Amino acid sequence: MPTIHRRPRWSVSELEVTPEAAFIGRRTLLKAMGAGAIAGSALPILQAAAAEDGSAAGRTADLYPAGRNDTYKVERAITPEDITGIYNNFYEFGSHKQIWRAAQSLVTDPWAITIDGMVEKPITLGFDELVRRMKLEERAYRHRCVEAWSMTVPWTGFPLASLLAFARPLGSAQYVVFETFNDPGMASGQKQVWYPWPYTEGVTMAEAGNELAFLVTGVYGKPLPKQFGAPLRLALPWKYGFKSIKSIRRISFTDKRPQSFWEKIAPSEYGFWANVNPDVPHPRWSQAQEQVLDTGERIPTLLYNGYAEEVASLYASLQDEMLYR
């Protein structure tokens, strides 16, 4: 019987995606964000940092650009790199949005990743060794921050499901836990001892195996810059952005549900699931709309950030859970 390829309902032809050059108003937005003066000079710095000679990311530069997976297209234009590159959350280096300069102090070489817990054989290996075991691809994903802004980004990486196959977790494992670094001498934000460092996040095994769950190693056709969470971060496009942990050092498998970073800090505001839902407000603001980062346009937020067809079945039996916070 022949295989029938069904494109997701949210995919569109590449011809329908507005090119970056069409966004002539983005300089106005940068100026409004207080970033207009540095945007032009920042991009070359960011690009050079992403492929720094001798770094773990630099040693894999030959893998980019990876081929675009045309299954994952979006109906929104790609957000220009000169905006996403200087508007970031990275609490390890501070709480303000123009964190990209401070994040350049992130040391990514050497960078070892430990895979442990309920697996057949725990292993620690270098980032570049792990990446070369995987087949990289590019996917365009929407990204929705819990703060109600959004962007669309061309991530490069590999499916989290490929990592699961490599790690060979035991059948009793129910959750995957991700942990970043803990180095206050390098990352000044980690000197704030009231935060529960290191940053941790977790998903169920079913979520980890979903086709959309993606481990990111690059962006805009290049190795991942430091402020994006180099050299390895997570992308879960149907969840609020704080679930997409940056600079992953450890991946563990467990049968106990983890408590993630923001859940520990403010459990009344942030929970384990954090699925996007316009009808469930944050305790301090509405989630019904979002502001597109480069245009400033306010648009309706979509259930599961527009990926309901791909992920809603994961939660069919969990209606008593707080799935949207």
Image: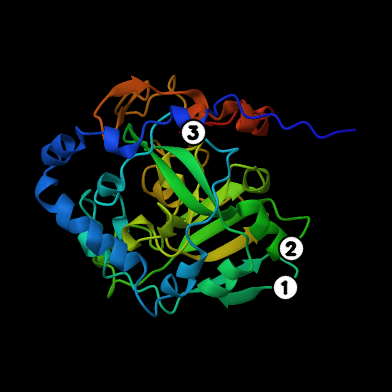
Q: Is mark 1 on a helix, strand or loop?
A: loop
Q: Mark 2 points at which residue?
A: 168
Q: How many residues crowd around disc 3 within 10 Å: few (fewer than 14), some, or many (20 or more)?
A: few
Q: Position of residue 108 (x, y in %)?
A: 39, 73
Q: Where is residue 138 in the image (x, y as percent from the top left)?
A: 52, 49
**Left or right, residue 115 beside residue 145:** right
Instruction: Find disc 1 in the rendering and name its residue.
Output: 121
* Residue 28 visible somewhere in the drawing: yes
| Marks 2 and 1 close (CB-CB < 8 Å) | yes
Picture quadrant where residue 242 is located: top left
Left or right position of 284 against 239: left
Q: Which amino acid does label 1 sit on?
A: Lys
- What is the C-alpha distance between the residues marked 2 and 1? 8 Å
Q: Looking at the image, do the residues carrying marks 2 and 3 touch, with CB atoms under 8 Å apart?
A: no
Q: Which of marks 2 and 1 is nearer the N terminus?
A: 1
Upstream in the sequence, badge 2 or badge 3? 3
Which of pointers 3 and 1 lies earlier in the amino acid sequence? Answer: 3
